[in-house]
Amino acid sequence: MMVLAQIILFWAAISCYVAASVLYVLSLKFEPSLKYTKYGSIAAFCGLVPETAAILVRWYQTGHGPYSQLYEVAAMSTWVSVTMFLVIQWRTKNLGYIGAFVMPLNFLLLGLGVLGSKEITVIPATFKTYWLIVHILFAKLTYGSMLVGCGCAVFYLLKTKYSSDWLAKLPALERLDELSYKYLAVGFLFNTIMIAAGSIWAKNAWGSYWSWDPIETWSFIAWLVYSIYLHLRRTYGWRGVKASWMALFTLAVTIFTLFGIAYLYPTIHEIYLNGKS
């Protein structure tokens, strides 16, 4: 019954996120009234309610936090990302249009997670540590920051390539470029903290700060790509189109690291996504 309740709640959340995505897309065309952005925000917030309930039910059912198997990882990543986006939208003027990029990716990720295995796994004692919580939390914050930053990059590229009334309503290119850099730089900080906390946890769990496990290796690669993006921008003055494409490449590498590696390579992190021992 608990699993059925979770599925119903998750699909309710997905429905709200789909509605939010449609409303944010409509806001691009009808932005002068602001009503579609407002309704999109309300739909996104309404989706957080059943998703929060589903995560809490799962937490109660398993006795541990939502960090085992894609089913739980996707739910928590989506929850943090949507919450971050709504807070950023509330604090930053005229940023609602980014929801047309952020919300579709989130409902797709949550849908993928809901379709995955719902088997309950036994979490080893090494997972019950403060450093693991920090590691996982900052992984989610990295994902959320990158979505917002890359959303700005997407609209920058669209605005430079096409000319239309709705694109003209978006912020100036310089503003989009600066916002993209701002949130990617914050994401880099979150990513660095994630790796540092993960290394401390690995020392306690496996006796070594770094063992070049596939997920560790790709985490370093993602961090390195992040570093190159920031270096090219700060040192060589990369702006605009080049920086936007580099931002999207960084997002692709990060998403692959967070959600794809464990399905392609054997790794001691497998229990984190798949519940394997």
Image (cartoon, rainbow, N blue to C red):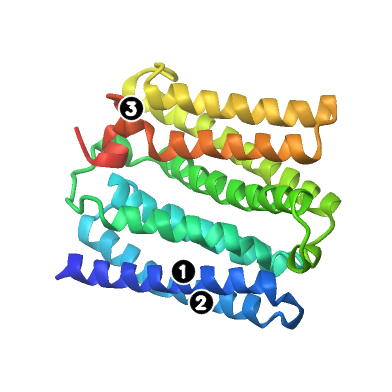
Looking at the image, how many numbered discs can be counted on the residues? 3
Q: Where is residue 152 in the image (x, y as percent from the top left)?
A: 70, 52
Q: Position of residue 61 (x, y in %)?
A: 21, 61
Q: Position of residue 16 (x, y in %)?
A: 44, 74
- Amino acid at dot 3: Ala
Q: Outermost residue toward the left?
A: 1
From mark 2 to mark 1, how far is it between C-alphas? 7 Å
Up-down: is 11 above or below 248? below
Residue at point 74% right, 34% down? Answer: 242
Residue at point 33% right, 67% down? Answer: 10
Indicate the quadrant containing the C terminus: top left, top right, bottom left or bottom right: top left
Sequence order check: which comes first, mark 3 or mark 1? 1
Up-down: is 71 above or below 92? above
Cβ–Cβ below 8 Å for labels 2 and 1? yes
Residue 43 circle label = 2
How many neighbours does mark 3 have within 10 angstroms: few (below 14), some (14-19), or many (20 or more)? some
**Which of these two is toward me, 69 or 252?**
252
Residue bearing the label numbered 1: 17
Residue 205 circle label = 3
Residue at point 14% right, 71% down? Answer: 1
- Amino acid at dot 2: Ala
